[in-house]
Image: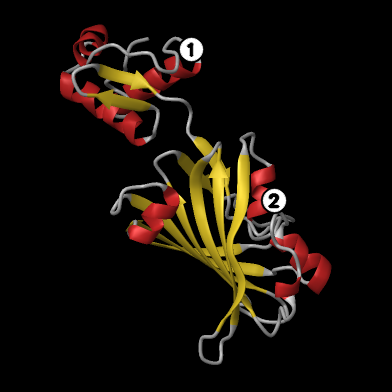
Amino acid sequence: MSLNPQSPIPLYRQLAGQILADIETGHYPVASRIPSENEFASTYSIGRPTVRQATDWLIRQGRLERRRGSGTYVLPPVRSIDLFSLAGTSAALQNIDLDAKLEVIGGPALEPAGDDRRLRIERLVRVEAVPAMHEVLRFDAQLFAGLEQHVVTGRSLSALVRDVFFMEPSSARQTFYAVAADEAQASLLDLSPGAPVLRVQRALHFEQQEDALLIDICCRTDHFEFSQTLYPALASGPAESTQETKL
């Protein structure tokens, strides 16, 4: 396939698309080395800087890995986890074709914060034994009185809220941050301190009370892709969520 210099799509993106297509069809299998920059430049009659732009873009997408002195290699497809739906983490993990486990590592414990008393639960998600996400959930202690009396290990908290308290979230507010992992986050996620992570702060609203459940999520992004399914405002899907991104 040749590249089209007259196309509004930059040449490097055209080349990246061709390389990606060759990966997905198995022409370049996972763990194989792709042609060198010189080989690509000769094949497509383009400059090496354009080839470098294309491979850099695919590296950022998690599809290639450059190894010093060896070449550029094909990585397995990025594993995508839809963890930001109102259905909750447990429900999301059931929908992925991966060996995912959710472990309660703290709580439930009462966490006083002035007049805003919360029941704190801390959980860690592992996917194929690799730490993927750490989350801290803080339930309004008055609205969810007695939550600590229920077994939360191995149980969907959203199902527990629905079945025991007869409540479901009506909407959510989510704020996204790109941050450097501190020592505690790095230890939990098996990362080096300062490694980039995705932090998500969620506030779930119920008909009975806004901000009834606050969730602080820290996601490891070097092995996993985290996604969110959105619905049009008038669609008959899950309750609409609002989002804010901060970098």
Q: Is residue 212 left or right of residue 56?
A: right
Q: Secondary structure at mark 2?
A: helix
Q: Residue 142 appears in which quarter of the rendering?
A: bottom right
The picture places residue 237, in percent across and down from the top left corner, at 72, 55
Residue at the image position 59 percent from the left and 63 percent from the top: 241
Residue that carries the numbered disc 2 in the rendered image: 91
Q: CA distance from mark 1 to mark 2?
A: 32 Å
Q: Residue at x 76, y 61 (%)?
A: 159
Q: Residues within 10 Å of mark 1 (few under 14, many from 20)?
A: few
Residue closest to the far bottom: 115
Residue placed under numbered mark 1 in the picture: 26
Q: Are marks 1 and 2 in contact (CB under 8 Å)?
A: no
What is the x, y in percent for residue 202?
54, 66
Residue 18 at x, y = what percent?
39, 18
Locate residue 154 relative to residue 73 in the image: left or right.
Answer: right
Instruction: Mark yes or no: residue 218 visible.
Output: yes
150 versus 176 height, above or below: below
Q: Which one is in front, 183 or 73?
A: 183
Q: Give the camera-side residue of 124 and 232.
A: 124
Of circles 1 and 2, the one toward us is: 2
Tag 1: amino acid: Gly
